[in-house]
Amino acid sequence: MANPGQVPDLEGLHREIHDMAEQMRIMNENNGRLMQLLTAANPQLPAAPSVPDIERSQHSNRSGRSFSQHQYRTSEGVRRGRSPHRGDQIEARNKSTSQKIRDLDARLDAINTGTNAPVTVDTLVRQTDPPFTERVLRARISSKFKFPTQLGIYEGKTDPMDHLDSYKSLMSLQGCSDEVMCKAFSATLKGPARSWFRKLSLGTIDSFGELSRLFVANFMSCRNRQKNASHLFTIHQKETESLKDFVKRFNQAVLKVEDPSNKVIIMAMMEGLRPGPLFDSLSKNVPETLSALQSKADKYIAAEELAEAKRRRRGKDDHKRKEPDTRRADYREETRYKRPDRDPKRFGKRRPRTPPRRPEFILPPLNAPVAQAKLRAIRKWPGNASFQPCGSKPLQFRPPNSNYRTWATTQRKWRVCVDFTDLNKACPKDSFPLPKIDLIVDATSKHELLSFMDAFSGYHQIKMYPPDIEKTSFITERGLYCYKVMPFGLKNAGATYQRLVNKMFKEQIGKIMEVYIDDMLVKSLRSSDHIAHLKEAFSILRRHRMMLNPSKCIFGVSSGKFLGFLVTKRGIEVNPDQIQVLTAMSSPKNIREVQQLTGRVAALNRFVSKSADKCLPFFKILRKSQTFQWNEEFENAFQQLKEYLGSPPLLTVPTTGEDLYVYLSISPTAVSAVLVREEDQVQRPIYYVSKVLMGAEARYPKIEKLAYALMIAARKFRHYFQAHPIIVLTDQPLKQILQRPDTSGRLLKWSIELSEFHIEYRPRMAIKAQALADFIVESTYEDTPQPETDPPETEIPKEPTSERDLAYWILFVDGSSNQHGCGAGLVIQTPSGEQMEYAIRMGFKATNNEAEYEALLAGLRVAVELGAQSLEIFNDSQLVVNQVQGDYLAKDARMMAYLGEAKGCVRKDQGI
């Protein structure tokens, strides 16, 4: 019976049976030949008794069965015509073989019985017992023993001799005994090698030598076979391969060859070299040693690299040299008819004083006449050019004035890129507008099922207008070609494709589909309608023969990436790939990495609250012209930005006709705004916008900065402002400033631009969303302490303003007059410290005192309009101040009229 604690070696038993059957087959063949010789020598020998048939077990393999049948036929065939003595020997041998086969069948039955037995936990645990004898298991391991961690784990895929040699070397350094080496060896095995170790029979390994022989024998197929010396003659220098790369590749191949001689290595290198300076030198003087060969190769490699460096340096300055334009003349010279009866070897050859560094080819530009050249439309990748002038040799080159390039993509495909800059300049701009991405993304949210589709090489599915085909021609080293379909890179390609898909899906766009150029989306508010919507979309695609790219299509999902956003039923989420790339960034080490950081943040501006303030330190680095320095301030800003993006907000989509709210925030260097909607008494953000103040914008008064923030929000959220009533929540007199009839300057311009929208101004209330915590404080300056933000869903009540605080309105007025005209200047300071400046130009002539009175009256009107209850006025005119206070008497009629008007304003509010 087989031991249930061990896995039966069925393959080994089958191999043993097969070997025995093969030996019996060879033996029977030899016996057959012997019987033929005996029959020929003694044709009338008596017949030998028949050999009994060999019993065959039902568990025997195919080789055993075929062997038994063959042996039976052989016995019958040689029964006649053999000697009795020889037949007795054969019969005895066959009986012995039959007995062996019966024993093997019995062993196979026992193994099958053990294999079919149920596997228990104890059986599995016993399989992990080491296969060592009691002597090895009783051996103790010293406490000073350290397992060699620098030794790699063997998985049965590499050369076993390398692993065994490394193991022996490391263990011998510690003076380990044979028993310790046996015990520690299993810790260096993994995967298939570990499985082989578990299959070893218990108590069979008594020394490390036995274990080593079994290990090498089992993984003999993984040994590295060294190559023959003839392999070196198969290594040749490639057409574009440098001498340095070839020598490196050749030396690596030498290491894989078994004991090559120096002469073979030298001859193989000479055979693989391309014709060149090193080949000529080796042909004239063949080195005798490998060191001499390597030394000579190093000299020529250094010379080749120096020549390449000079060529590149010269190539950078080539564009600076101004040479006469001879393209048209050279083009005519090349295309002129060449008489074939002349000597082609002397045709068109010039003998300059010094040989040129490299051949220069001048071909006609795209706007040159193409009547003499053949246009080959792109049906497949261009073949060989058929035109070859007399006496010229074919050269592979890229024309210097060619407008195309090729490069390999990550999918191992070649992509052709044609530069249509000159053609785009000559083409008029198509006025067909592309849809707004924000509107498309908003329209895709709140749907149960979505399907994303992408057109296969979308632009190439549109044929070119026949008269315009030749305009897309481009020059290659194989000839002149043009596009029969619309190529990528044309200025109006996007607008043309958008017009096409809008015409195709005009009944579906906005209802069940959204299309942006070649990106299409089918949406369904109810999952039960999605199949019908897909059928409708596919019927249109089939009707117009538009093909899709299956690798980029996703059907029947509840969320997906569309136009750079993650669209879900809940709303709009940030693309997790963009977040992962940004959060995985390390601290920038140069200006280029800072530019990459700001570019990635710019793609997430919609989700980042007050992004201009968060990225201001990075903008400072980009503005500085001195050496890049990354200090603690920049590192803190970088870490805070990554922490914020760790939990980006979820943006919602407003419903039709819903009131939207705008919060404004200003700082000394930036203005910000957020558009929110209220749902179940909870404010949810829709869009964030922020802008860094540049130049004079940073010197605006605070009230003008708030107006500028509202203006930026109106421009960015224009489609929201046009479709919804907007409520601006602010504690500043923004409405009075923008809607005053005497507003001038930029405030007047902004007021006119904002007048087209339905905007209502209300005082700020409590904010109940953590996503809007940055907008709790409307005006933040460096000298103003920042309040701590409360947790979400906590109300921040508005503190009442006392009448004493409203008494600190201050007005500075000044007027002046000269022969060119007169004007006035006003500065109003609010109780919170904000300043508003006004400049007034009078359209009539006035004296200096009259101008002072006009400035005073204008300041009083503005203060009353702003709601000032108490005002302190400063004026540099002693006459005006004393007359208003009653210290001086006004005698002139005009002064008396001005004084009465001023006192009338004072009587309206006793606090002035």
Image (cartoon, rainbow, N blue to C red):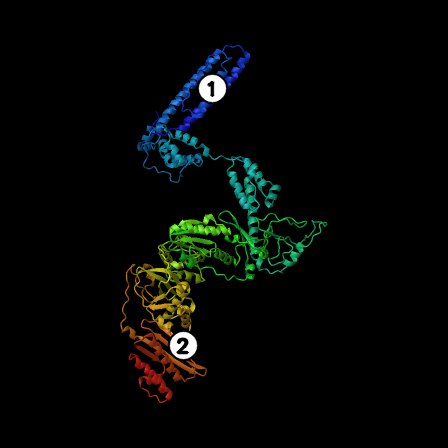
Within 10 angstroms of label 2, few (less than 14), some, or many (20 or more) residues? few
Quadrant of image for the C terminus: bottom left
Q: Secondary structure at mark 2?
A: strand
Side (left or right) of 804 relative to 640:
left
Measured as percent of width and height from the top left, residue 877 is found at: 36, 83
Residue type, mark 1 in image: Gln
Mark toward the viewer: 2 or 1: 1
Residue that protrudes farthest toward the bottom in the picture: 891
* Residue 905 spot, x, y in % from top left: 33, 81
Q: Which mark is residue 598?
A: none
Q: Amino acid at mark 2?
A: Ala
Out of 414 and 567, give the one closest to the viewer: 567
On the picture, is 391 further left or further right than 383?
right
Quadrant in the rendering for residue 315: bottom right
Q: Residue 361, image x and y in percent? A: 62, 54
Of 777 and 755, the residue lying toward us: 755
Identify which residue, 870 or 766, lies in the foreground: 766
- The answer to the question of whether label 2 and label 1 lie on touching residues, with beta carbons closer than 8 A, is no
Quick one: which residue is furthest to the right in this view?
341
| Residue name at image x 50 percent, y 13 percent | 80
Is disc 1 placed on a helix, strand or loop?
helix
* Residue 839 - label: 2
Which of the 4 image quarters holds residue 219?
top left
The quadrant of the image that shows the N terminus is top left
Q: Which residue is mark 1?
A: 71
* Viewer can see residue 175: no
Residue 910's spot in the image, x, y percent?
29, 80
Tell me if residue 218 comes above or below residue 419 in the rendering.
above
Q: Mark 2 or mark 1, which has the lower sequence index?
A: 1
The residue sitting at 53% across, 57% down in the picture is 490
As rendered, which of 93 and 574 lies closer to the eye?
574
